[in-house]
Image (cartoon, rainbow, N blue to C red):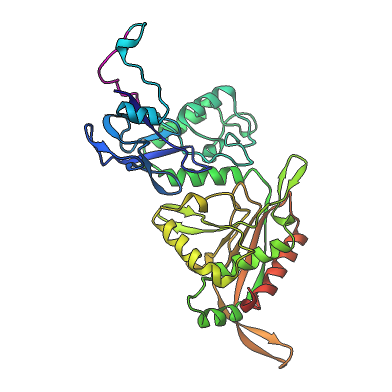
């Protein structure tokens, strides 16, 4: 009977591999078409690999807690001739062939491929390295261990001009063995990869004080209540719909303007951060975004973010005030130019020119980190000013 492979699918635009979490079926069991047969986890979410058709599992190649690249064969199904014909598979019985018969019996499982988590499809190549000089021998050794130039930050170099030699590196490795070490999660490695590539650009941060009393009053009167980050997201979307140039990306000598105002927002999850994306945020009012926003937060915390809400955003909003922080310098994702942040509120005196006296005001620091190749301080300041103006009239968002 024909055999059909179960293949690791492309689980998202920026997903290059996934880790096997659980295989709830055993060899000999029957599965239906489109049935979840293998549970996997990427650096973005927990997902499932489905059966391409109805059949009997005759071989399981994948091993739990191992990572497999897109396109890897995870298992095999045995299907009847009718199912094979429906799938367009030409299966000719061995008795009808003129050549030698194929060997019978199970195929030996192939060794699992170890794949380092990566983020692909971004403007900065995944193979980008630091600017410091590395000898060919040291590069080869680091490539063998799956390390990057940034991993040498803690290594003291004894070579010319402080260069790290191969001997320095080997001594460093020997000392590392004296320390307790734990395996980094796939999400932590993916975050490190993204931040490493982001750091190849000249980044800058500007900030200003923001009176958030109007925002807080509007939130108290709303049902359901929008989160503070959603107010920022909507104001940023409106500002970028008026002028999308600050969110453009530099590619060679061209600035690529965004086709859609798709904005992400940071959600803390176990051992990392996920960034769900609200598509066309400039075309939906704040009240229309609340339920979708809350739904995506829940999906992100459960590590089940749908593919439609992953990647492709032009900017990110983060509420670092949740952690009691008043000021921060968030780093834009590699495919983005902007990240807008909001700090914790503090009650401070603010001069009221109408009443000619200081009045209590809840003030937060709003920051904008940006790619300095695309945007200068003046442009960043004007964008922040426009966002602040919009946030003073939250009912119009």
Name the residue rendered at 46%, 35% in the picture.
Answer: 116
Give the left or right position of residue 100, taking residue 324 as reference: left
Q: Is residue 315 left or right of residue 93?
A: right
Q: Residue 349 is drawn in which quadrant?
A: bottom right
Q: Which of the two residues, 32 or 109, is positioned nearer the viewer here?
A: 32
> Which is more toward the observer, 387 or 15?
15
Say which of 44 and 366 sits in front: 44
Rendered-image quadrant of the C terminus: bottom right
Residue at the farthest bottom position: 355
The percent position of residue 359, horizontal first and vertical second, equals: 64, 88
Image spot of residue 366 (x, y percent): 63, 68
Residue 362 can be seen, yes or no: no
* Region of the chain picked out in magenta, as a range: 101-111
- The structure residue drawn at horizontal position 74% and vertical position 51%, both measured from the top left corner, is 374
On screen, residue 307 above or below 288? above
- Tell me the quarter of the picture where residue 235 sits: bottom right
Residue at (67%, 66%) from the top-left corner? 238
Percent coordinates x, y for residue 118 in the rendering: 50, 39
**2 lies left or right of 324:** left
Classify the position of the N terminus by image quarter: top left
Secondary structure mostly seen in magenta is: loop
103 is higher (above) or lower (below) than 317: above
Q: Position of residue 143 (x, y in %)?
A: 51, 28
Whether 300 is among the magenta residues is no
Q: Magenta includes 104?
A: yes
Is residue 83 placed above or below 243 in the rendered structure?
Answer: above
Q: Is residue 261 left or right of residue 189?
A: right
From the viewer's side, name the closer residue of 290 and 199: 290
Q: Is residue 117 above or below residue 60?
A: below
């Amino acid at each position: 009977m024909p055999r059909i492979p179960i293949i690791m699918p492309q689980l998202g635009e920026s997903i290059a591999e996934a880790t096997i979490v659980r295989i709830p079926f055993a060899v000999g069991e029957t599965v239906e078409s489109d049935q979840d047969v293998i549970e996997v986890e990427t650096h973005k979410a927990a997902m499932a690999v489905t059966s391409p058709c109805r059949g009997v599992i005759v071989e399981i190649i994948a091993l739990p807690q191992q990572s497999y690249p897109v396109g890897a064969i995870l298992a095999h199904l045995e299907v009847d001739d009718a199912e094979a014909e429906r799938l367009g598979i030409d299966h000719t019985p061995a008795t009808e062939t003129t050549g030698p018969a194929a060997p019978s019996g199970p195929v030996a499982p192939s060794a699992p491929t170890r794949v380092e988590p990566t983020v692909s499809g971004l403007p900065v190549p995944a193979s980008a390295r630091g600017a410091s000089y590395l000898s060919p021998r040291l590069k080869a050794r680091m490539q063998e261990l799956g390390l990057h130039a940034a991993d040498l930050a803690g290594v003291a170099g004894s070579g010319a001009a402080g260069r790290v030699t191969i001997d320095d590196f080997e001594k460093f490795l020997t000392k590392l063995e004296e320390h307790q070490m734990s395996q980094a999660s796939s999400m932590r490695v993916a975050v490190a990869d993204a931040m490493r590539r982001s750091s190849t650009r000249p980044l800058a941060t500007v900030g200003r004080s923001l009176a958030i009393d109007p925002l807080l009053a509007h939130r108290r009167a709303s049902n359901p209540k929008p989160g503070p980050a959603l107010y920022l997201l909507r104001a940023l979307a409106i500002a970028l719909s008026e002028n999308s140039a600050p969110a453009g990306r530099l590619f060679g000598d061209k600035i690529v303007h965004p086709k859609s105002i798709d904005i992400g927002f940071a959600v803390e999850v176990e051992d990392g951060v996920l960034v769900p994306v609200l598509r066309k945020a400039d075309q939906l009012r704040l009240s229309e975004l609340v339920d979708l926003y809350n739904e995506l937060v829940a999906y992100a915390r459960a590590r089940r973010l749908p593919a439609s809400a992953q990647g492709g955003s032009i900017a990110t909003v983060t509420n670092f005030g949740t952690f009691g922080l008043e000021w921060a310098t968030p780093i834009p994702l590699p495919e983005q130019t902007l990240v807008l942040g909001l700090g914790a509120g503090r009650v401070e005196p603010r001069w009221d020119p109408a009443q000619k006296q200081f009045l209590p005001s809840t003030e937060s620091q709003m920051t904008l980190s940006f790619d300095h190749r695309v945007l200068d301080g003046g442009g960043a300041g004007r964008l922040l000013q426009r966002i602040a103006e919009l946030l003073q009239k939250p009912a119009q968002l």
